Structures are given as C-alpha cells and as structure tokens.
Amino acid sequence: MNDRTAPDQLAAPFGDDYGPLLTGVHAPLAEEYELRDLRVIRGSVPTNLSGVYLRAGPNARYAPNGRYHPFDGDGMIHAAHFDNGQLTYRNRWVQTDGLAEELAEGRATHHGIRETLKGRSDRRLKDTANTDMVGHRGRALALWYMSGDAYEIDPVTLQTLGKSRAIRHSGGKISAHAKVDEITEEMMFFDYGDEAPYMHYGVVGADGQLRHHVAIDLPGPRLPHDMAVTEHYSILHDLPLFHDHEAKALGRHKIDFHPELKSRFGVIGRYGAADSIRWFDFSPCYLYHVVNAWEDGDSLVMVGCRYMPALDAQGHIDARRTAKDVAELVMRARLWEWRMNLRTGEATERMLNDKHNAEFPTCNGRMTGRKTRYGYLVDHSDTTTLQWSGVRKYDLFSGQDLGGWSDDQQHSWYSEPWFAEADAPRGEDDGFVVAFQWNEALKRQTLDIFDAHDLSQGPVAQVELPHRVPTGFHACWIERDRLARST
Ligand SMILES: [Fe+2]
C-alpha cells in the first residue's frame, strides 16, 4: 500500500468538466484507505505523542448536478492516529443521510449551493457534514457550516456511529464551530437559519444530554460562521454580511456587505436566559474564525481573523467586492482582538498583526475558553483560493509573529494545523503542531509534525503518504485520555 501514487489517483475522477475546484489539488479521492508503516522522510515520529488528528473536507462521491462549489462535496475525514509511536492514516466518508441516498441511487440526487436558489423545490441541498471536526465525549462530531445534524464518528476507525440525539432533541440544528470546554467537557453550540428568531444557542453536558437551548433574536437572517466561549460566557456573532432578501425571494444567490451596519457580538452566560444576552457593537467586518476567547477581569477578550473589507480607489469600503470575495472564499484576514467590558459596556478592538494574511486558527484545545498565549494559523495565499501556503505561530497577547514554516511558499498546500500536546505536557505550547501538506511541485503528500515551541525549525517529522489528501476545511486533535472517554 505504500508505493507512490498511481497516476490515476491524481486524476479528477469526474474528468475536467466541472471546473478547477474538482480537479488538481481539489480533486476528490475515490477510495478509503487504512495505512501503517508509512515512510518517514524527515526526522522521526515523536514517541511522546498520543491521540488523533482529524481533518474534515469536501470529497464529492458523485459528479455534481450543475455548478460545483467547494462547500458542496460529501464530507470525508482524514485521520492520523498516534499510538505508542505507531502512526496510522485513515480516510473515510461521513455516512450522511444524503450520501446514503445517493449510494442507493448510484448518482448525485442533490444540488450544490450554486444551483439550489432557483425557486425549484426539486433541488435539494445536502447536509454533507464536511466542514468541521469537534471532539466530544470520546467521539468526533462532523459538522456542517449551514447548520445540520451532528454526525458522531468513531475517532479511531472513522466509522459513522449515528447522529447526536442531544442535537435532535433540541428540535434545532448545529452549525460548524461548536466549542468544547475540555475542562468541563460541556459543548456549546449555535445554529442559524432563514426563519425567525434566526439563531439558537445551546449546551450539551458532559453526560451527553441537552442541558440548555434558547432562541436568539437577530434582526434578520444572518450568515454567522463561528462563536466563542469563555469559562462562564458564550459569544455569538451578528455580522453585516448576509443574503439580499429580495434576490433570494426571486431565487437568486446574492450576498451583500453592509458597511453602514455594525458587527455585533452577543455575550450570554453559559446557561443564560435568552433575554440576558448583551450585544457589543464593533466596526463592520466579516469574520469566519475565532482563535480563542477568555475572561480578563471585567472584560471578555476574543481573538480572531478579521476579514479586511476591500477598498476602492478612494480608500472607502467597496461593499460589493467585499461580498463577492467572501462568497468566493478570497480571504484577506488579519489577527484581531475584540474586548468587551461587562461592567462598563465598553467595546474596543485592535489589529494584532498587520503583516500576515492569517486564517484557519487553532490553539491548545485543552484551554478553549481560557487565556491562551499562543495561536497556530496558516499563511493564506493572497493570490490562490484556498491555498494555505505555510504554518505560523503567534503570540495572541501582542500579535507578535513567533515564526513560521513552509517547504515551498508557492507550491505547498497545508491543511489546518492543530496543536497536539505532548504526553505529560509542561506548558501551554509543550507539544506538536500537526498538518497535512501537499507539495504540488513534487506531487508529494506528507503529514508534517512540528515542535510547537518553534515552527521555524521545520518539521521534526515528515511522513509520506502514497496519495494526495485533497484540500479541506477544519481539523481537531483528540488526546489519548479524551479518546478513552468513550460513551
Ligand atoms: Fe470554518
């Protein structure tokens, strides 16, 4: 199984008819693998690393009906399981209801997001579970950015076990970017949609039961993508970028950015009543991803990747281009800090680092909702959509660049990295940073493992895989002790 990739595995399984996002580095895999005894081409796999790195992404099983967007592909998980110095790679599709239906039919029976807003009821969108991975109660949850079911996955075998009963019990759905407090093992989540009240917020307890679920009234349908938690609060997002309602009613897909509106972050106690939410106003922006948030005296601090609005020749916000760029995943993001004072109501914000286009942020997951000094992000290419050309560590207090690495800024495609703590860690950054890397120049796929203290030294281990891992979205790390906390 460890021979170099056969040429046909590099080819687009549906041919070149569906555009660049189903070919080349984005072409889906046609097979599921379980691989051991992989070739280590640099350094050695750390023996003090135990757990699993899981990365979700789109991997279309069948040729699409019409135009394809990267958000449409069936969810596939790629996993690197570290166990007593042994490394096992696996990849498997998430067995969603939609995929099961298509497997039975032998063809795509759904349509993608570019084809569904046509006012035609026969064009159904599929909950692909392709966006995010979250570790909770010994299982991995595969989540979808448009709000759907939480598919429960065995984090080692990647078998789909079923759908979260707690989320179904809520009567609502769950978006990508639910947050797990790994100290209490509670999971905070939200959903959003087109019907009033447009958002819900909830908590699943360490026992797997739905413990809290409230409606959050928004001014209208919105497109929030992430949330944040601290030890006692959750922070929900209302951003001035959303569907044009008139166009949508006519069946057209159009997103508008409203620079005349504010970005609003709503602070609610972890088990707070719906009417207790407090909104803080900030400058208008779009925001995909939060690095982490924490409590600091009377204030909540949230650090994230603020999408920088496009500017016209006069230096004013170009709302149209900003909306278009967001829709087409053209990202220009900067590390940013928002501060909300719960005593005075004051809201302040500042750019932490003006140099790097930084996205797909991660931190030490054990400290989600607690004060973390370090973040690990990708360098986002300014020119190539979805290309993350390097990995970089930041000081989240000062925004200082603490060093990054890329094998080849032009040809490397890294996946979202995650911090993986060492066995018996002695500090926040005592561990490793794990990411997949496709090198387009060498046509070489590797799993790269960095010493989290200093990414600029390059990977301490680089393990070759015999096939390409297609570009994807979010990842997580589940430590050995949390893997064992099975339900
Ligand atoms: Fe995301």
Image: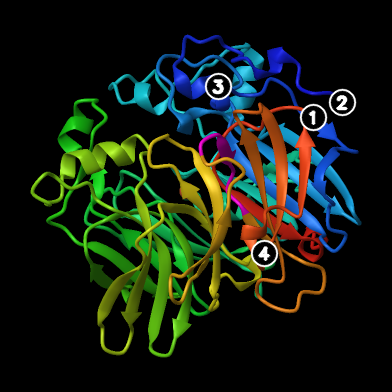
Q: Mark 1 points at which residue?
A: 33
Is 174 situated left or right of 180 in this image?
left
The quarter of the displayed image where residue 432 is located: bottom right
Tell me which label, 4 or 2, sits earlier in the chain: 2
Residue 452 numbered tag: 4
Q: Mark 3 points at which residue?
A: 24
Q: Is mark 3 on a helix, strand or loop?
A: helix
Q: Which residue is drawn at 55% across and 77% down?
A: 370
Specify the quadrant that holds the C terminus: bottom right
Tell me which label, 3 or 4, sits earlier in the chain: 3
Using the image as rendered, state which of residue 299 and residue 306 is in the foreground.
306
Amino acid on which the number 3 mark rests in the picture? Gly
Tell me which label, 3 or 2, sits earlier in the chain: 2
Tell me which label, 3 or 1, sits earlier in the chain: 3
Q: Is mark 4 on a helix, strand or loop?
A: loop
Using the image as rendered, state which of residue 106 and residue 39 is in the foreground.
39
Q: Are marks 2 and 1 in contact (CB under 8 Å)?
A: yes
Residue 174 numbered tag: none
- Cα separation between marks 4 and 2: 31 Å
Tell me which label, 2 or 1, sits earlier in the chain: 2
Q: Identify the magenta region.
A: 410-417
* Residue 129 makes an appearance in the image: no
Q: Name the residue under label 2.
A: 1
396 within the magenta span: no
- Cα separation between marks 3 and 2: 22 Å
Q: What element carries label 2?
A: loop
Amino acid on which the number 4 mark rests in the picture? Ala
